Amino acid sequence: MLHLAGESVDMSKAVRDWSFQESEFIKWGIKPGESSFSVAGGKVEFMDWWSRMSKTGILGDPTKANKARGKRLFDIYVDSLVKFTREFRKREILPRKDYH
């Protein structure tokens, strides 16, 4: 949001929250203290109730946020979404079979 609409962000409310349960398998986000965008946890995507993952409604450390980092993340996500969309559009739609 700092990158897209920084004027609507109140950084005085930003608090660090890494209170989620650690997992070897479940991917939670960017590792605390990492300067690059390495992922905490494993390769499994899992969405639990947010209130069970976070004590504050935050997952991570927004106190480290700035416009430049936001732009970098935004660009990474947009590039990945574009690549996925291009790949998905090329997928052959195979006929379904009823195995019942």
Image (tube, grey):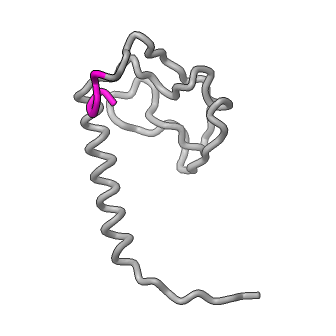
Q: Residue at x 36, y 62 (%)?
A: 84
Residue 6 included in the magenta stretch of the image: yes
Q: Quadrant of residue 22?
A: top right
Residue occupying the far front of the picture: 8
Q: Position of residue 29 (x, y in %)?
A: 48, 37
Q: Main secondary structure of the magenta part?
A: helix
Q: Quadrant of residue 98?
A: bottom right
Q: Nearer the viewer, residue 49 or 9?
A: 9
Q: Nearer the viewer, residue 7 or 42?
A: 7
Q: Is residue 95 left or right of residue 80?
A: right
Residue occupying the far right of the picture: 100
Q: Is residue 79 above or below residue 29?
A: below
Q: Is residue 21 left or right of residue 17?
A: right
Q: Quadrant of the C terminus?
A: bottom right
Residue occupying the far top of the picture: 12
Q: Residue at x 55, y 45 (%)?
A: 42
Q: Quadrant of the N terminus?
A: top left
Residue 26 visible in the picture: yes
Q: Nearer the viewer, residue 4 or 58?
A: 4
Which stretch appears magenta? 1-7
Q: Position of residue 18 (x, y in %)?
A: 55, 24
Q: Is residue 69 above or below residue 100?
A: above
Q: Quadrant of residue 25?
A: top right
